[in-house]
Amino acid sequence: MIFTSDKDYKSTKKIKQGISKIKEEFEPLAKWIDQKYEVKTLNIIFDYIKNNKSHPRLQICLEHARDKGKFMNNKTYNFHKRKQKEIAEKFREVKSNYEVENKPNWIKKILGFTYKTNNLYVYFTDFESIAKIEANESIPEAEIKKLKSDLNNQEIWEIAKAFSGVTFFLYTDEQLKRYQDSEIHKKWSEQYFDLLKDCDEFKYFKKDYFSVYLDSKENFDTNYDSNWYYYYK
């Protein structure tokens, strides 16, 4: 679950919206994760890395970015190995119990509807981060152009949204320094937030913590060869 177009994101979004539910066989594991680690699990997805049956993986789709942070190793910025192992072991237990309670399941085995747990790779994603990107990308370009027109400030070169944020570009570095953390900067943040909140279906953006980024065309031209790909790379 990396992009708003990912099927995993779309299926998890339906769960968040109340349109669908997490698969029945994953409910006990989700409840266990939530209780043990004090997080909110929205969805659990099982598949195989590159469709290789020898490399099963389990995606734990958490709701919030702070929840995902609980499964990251602060020293290495990789997933926490102990917690990956704990969840893999619990998944094997839950899977075994589910199969016993739901016998006969020979039809599932014949058709291949079983979850392989040997060499299982557990990883974590969060719904909030992608939902924020979707909200920001949903602001119509016409609204961005109107905002720029309404601001009527000749020192603004461009308003460029990307991912879950937006950058107001001044023309020069001198202008950038003058506006940074000014009252006008705060006002711009409030005005852009007014556009953003209408597209933020799940209200993940908080006004008190939202601020537009400031940069300059001078920096864009000098250090990024006037190239958007290099800038956002």
Image: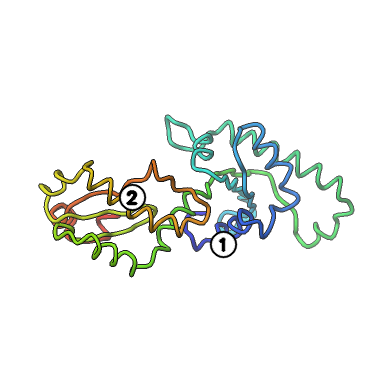
**Is residue 134 among what the camera can see?**
no
Amino acid, disc 2: Glu
Q: Report, in whole angstroms, how far the alpha carbon at label 2 lies from the one at label 1.
A: 33 Å
In the image, residue 214 above or below residue 112: above
Read off the residue under disc 1: 7
* Quadrant of the snapshot with the C terminus: bottom left
Task: Pinpoint residue 122: horizontal percent, then vertical percent.
Answer: 59, 43
Determine the image quadrant of residue 67: top right
Instruction: Tell whether 44 sits left or right of 225.
Output: right
Extreme residue in the bottom direction = 142
Disc 2 is placed on an element classified as helix
Image color mode: rainbow
Q: Residue shown at 16%/56% (left/top)?
A: 217
Disc 1 is placed on an element classified as helix
Crowd class of label 2 (few under 14; some 14 to 19; many from 20; radius 10 Å): some
In the image, residue 200 above or below residue 71: below
Task: Pinpoint residue 221: horizontal percent, then vertical percent.
Answer: 14, 57
| Earlier sequence position, callout 2 versus callout 1 | 1
Read off the residue under disc 2: 190
Task: Pinpoint residue 48: horizontal percent, then vertical percent.
Answer: 61, 54
Amino acid, disc 1: Lys
